[in-house]
Amino acid sequence: MTRAAYDLEAQCGAARAGTLTVRGKSLATPAFLPVGTYGAVKGLFPSDVREQGAAMVLANACHLHDRPGADTIAALGGLHAFMNWDGLILTDSGGFQVFSMLDIAVLDDDGVTFRSPLDGRPLRLGPDEVVDIQLALDSDIAMVFDHCPPLPASRGLLETAVARTTAWAKRAVLRHNQHNAKGQALFAIVQGGLDDELRRRSAEELCALPFDGWAAGGLSVGEGPEALAGAVHRYAPLLPSDRLRYLMGVGRPDDVLEAIAAGFDVFDCVYPTRNGRHGSVFTREEGKVHLRNRRFRDRRDVIDASCPCPACAGGWSVATLRHLVMAQDPLGRALCSLHNLRYLHDLVAGARAAIVDGTFERYHAERRSG
Amino acid sequence: MTRAAYDLEAQCGAARAGTLTVRGKSLATPAFLPVGTYGAVKGLFPSDVREQGAAMVLANACHLHDRPGADTIAALGGLHAFMNWDGLILTDSGGFQVFSMLDIAVLDDDGVTFRSPLDGRPLRLGPDEVVDIQLALDSDIAMVFDHCPPLPASRGLLETAVARTTAWAKRAVLRHNQHNAKGQALFAIVQGGLDDELRRRSAEELCALPFDGWAAGGLSVGEGPEALAGAVHRYAPLLPSDRLRYLMGVGRPDDVLEAIAAGFDVFDCVYPTRNGRHGSVFTREEGKVHLRNRRFRDRRDVIDASCPCPACAGGWSVATLRHLVMAQDPLGRALCSLHNLRYLHDLVAGARAAIVDGTFERYHAERRSG
C-alpha cells in the first residue's frame, strides 16, 4: 500500500490530470511547488504563497540540517509548525546541492563529508542520515539521498552515480521503513544524466523497490531547453504510470508545459521566485520581462490586468514595482515573486483544465512562448 | 484658515489627545508615523502597515526627488497612487538627510548643492525647490526645507541655522501659497539645537508665519535620552497649543512616552522598522530583545501572546523568527518590523485612551521601561 496515492483522472496524449493524496492532504496535478530552501519561500508570507495556488512547498533537508538543525525543528513540533505551513511539504534530500560543491566535499560509498557553507564545521550526509533528518523534520514526502553529478559528466561517472544511487536507495528504504511512524512517503530519484541506457537502468532498479513515488533528478542542470525537452519525453515513460511522476528543478514556464506534455505531474524550482527577486516578471504577451529596463519607468498600468496576484490585483503600477526593485526594497521583490508564482500556478491549473477537457495540445501551443 | 485642523479632545497634564484633519482624512493623536523613505515602509505591504495602526506614513521628498523623481511620481498620479497608500502622507523635506552629508554638500543662503548618493549626479535643493517637489508629489502635509546642523554644533552655527531656517520658511510660505492648488498643508520646523534661547527665537519667528503646523526638528540626533527628555518638556510649550505639535525623528518607546507627556502629538522614526529588520523586537516584559541571541533558539512561544500583529497572532514561534533573521530571510525582517510597528501604535493608542481617562501619568509609569 502506498503512502502517496495517485488517482489519474484524465489523460490527453501523455499529459495527465490527477490527484495526489498524502496523509489525507490532496494535491491536484499537474502542480508546481514553490521552493523554501531554509523553511520559507524567501520573503513571502505562507498565506500569500497559499493564495497564489500552492498546496505543497519544497524545503531542503540538507540546508535545514545545517541550520537550525533537524533536532531543533523536531523539538519545535516539526517542519509544518516551524514553517507555519499547514499544506503539504516535500523535503529534498540535498543531493543536488551537496554534489554541486564537490570541490569541497569528499564522496565515499556511504555518503559525503563536507563543510557547512555557513560556518565551516564538518557535516556528514549519507542515505541513512538523510532519512533520519527527514523523519525528524516530519515532512510529508521525503526524497532519498542520490548521487547527482553535475552535467556534463563522463559515462563512467554517470554509471557510478546510477549504481550508487540505487545502493543508497535500498538502504534508504530499509531505514525509512524501520523508523517511519507517521506515514511519511518516500520517493526515489532516477539518475543517468542524458544517457538513455543509464536512465533506463536507473529507473528499472529504483522502480523495483517499494517507493511511494519516483522523480527524475539530474535534469535542468545546464543542458539547455532543447535537450531538456527531448529528455522529458524519453524519461517520463520510464516511471510507473500509476504513481506520481516528479520532475525536479524545472520551473521555466515553457519547460513545465513540455514536461506536462511528456507525462510529468509535479515540478519545483526557484525560477519564479529568484526571477521575481531580481525584478523579472512573467507575462503572457512578452514572456519574461526585466522591470529594471528604463522603458518601464513611467508605466502606470499593472503587469497584467487579468492577473489576480497581489501585485496586479493590488493595483501596483509597473513604474512603482520598477522603483521598488531599483531601490532594492524587499516589498518589490515579494510582489514580483508572488506574481511569478501566480503565473506558474495558473499556467499548470490551466493545463489541468485543458487535459480534463481534452484540449491540452491546443493549450500548450497557445501558452508556449518560444 | 488652516489646512490641518487640530481638535483637542482631552488633556492630562501636558499630554494631549486630539484629532488632526487634513483633506478630509483624520489622524487620532498621539500618533506614530512609520517611515517609508523611498515610498515604501521597507519590505511591508501597505495593508499590513495600515492594519498595525498606521493612519499616516512619512516619505522623504529629497530621496524621492533623487529616485524616481518628483515629476515621474506626479505623472503617475501622485505619491498616494505611487505608494498604493490611501491614508495620510507627510513628506519630510530632506533637510536632516542633506545636512548629515555636508562633507559632500555645499551650502549657501539659497540652498544646498550636493551629489546624488545613488549615481553622483549634481542635485540642488533649496526652500523653493523643496516646496515644488512636495507639491508635485501631492503629499498631504509638506515640510519646509530647514537648516538642520548635526549636534553637537557651535552656538554660532546653531544661530546661523535658525536664521536661515526662518528665511527659508518665509520663502516656502510664499512659494507654497502661490502654487498650492489642492489643499496641501505646510509645516515649519523649529531649530536651535539644545540652546533654549535659540529654540525660543526659532519658534517665535516661525510661529509668526502662516503655517498649518509646527514641528521640532534637530532633536534625537545623538544627544542621549536624558537630554532629549529635558528638551521635549522645554520645547513643546514653545509651539501653539491649538495646532498639531510634531516631534521629528523620535521612535524609541520611552522617548515617545516622554514626548507625549510633554505635549507633542505626532512622531516618526525608522526605529521600530530598522530594529525589526535587524531582528530586535520590542517586548513589555524585557524591553528590546535581540532575537539573534542563542537563548531564543528553542523558544516555541510567540513574542507576545497578547499582541495582535501578524508575527504573534500568526503563530510564528520566536525560534522560527530567529531562524529567519539568522538566514537573512526578508520574511523574518517583515514579521519583526510589523511586530514593532504594532507595539508602537498600541503604545500611543494606549496613551491616548489614558489621556482621555485622565490616567496618563499612571500609564506612563507602567509602560516606561527605564
Image (spheres, coloured by chain):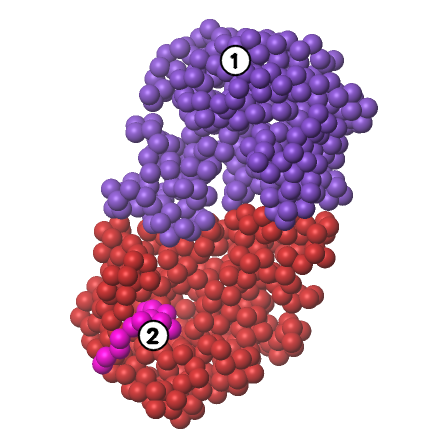
Chain colours: A red, B purple
Badge nearest the viewer, 1 or 2: 1
Residue A302 visible in this rendered orientation of the protein: no
Q: Which mark is residue B227?
A: none
Residue at 52% across, 36% down: B49
Residue at 60% across, 38% down: B104
Residue B28 vs residue A160: left or right? right
Residue A19 is one of the magenta-drawn residues: no
For the residue pair B6 and B90, the one nearer the viewer reads as B90
Residue at 53% across, 10% down: B196
| Residue that label 2 marks | A103
Q: Chain of mark 2?
A: A
For the residue pair A177 and A36, the one nearer the viewer reads as A36
Residue A287 visible in this rendered orientation of the protein: yes
Q: Position of residue B41 (x, y in %)?
A: 54, 39
| Residue that label 1 marks | B195
Q: Give the residues drawn in magenta, as a range.
A: A93-109
Vertical relation: B130 (above or below) A74:
above
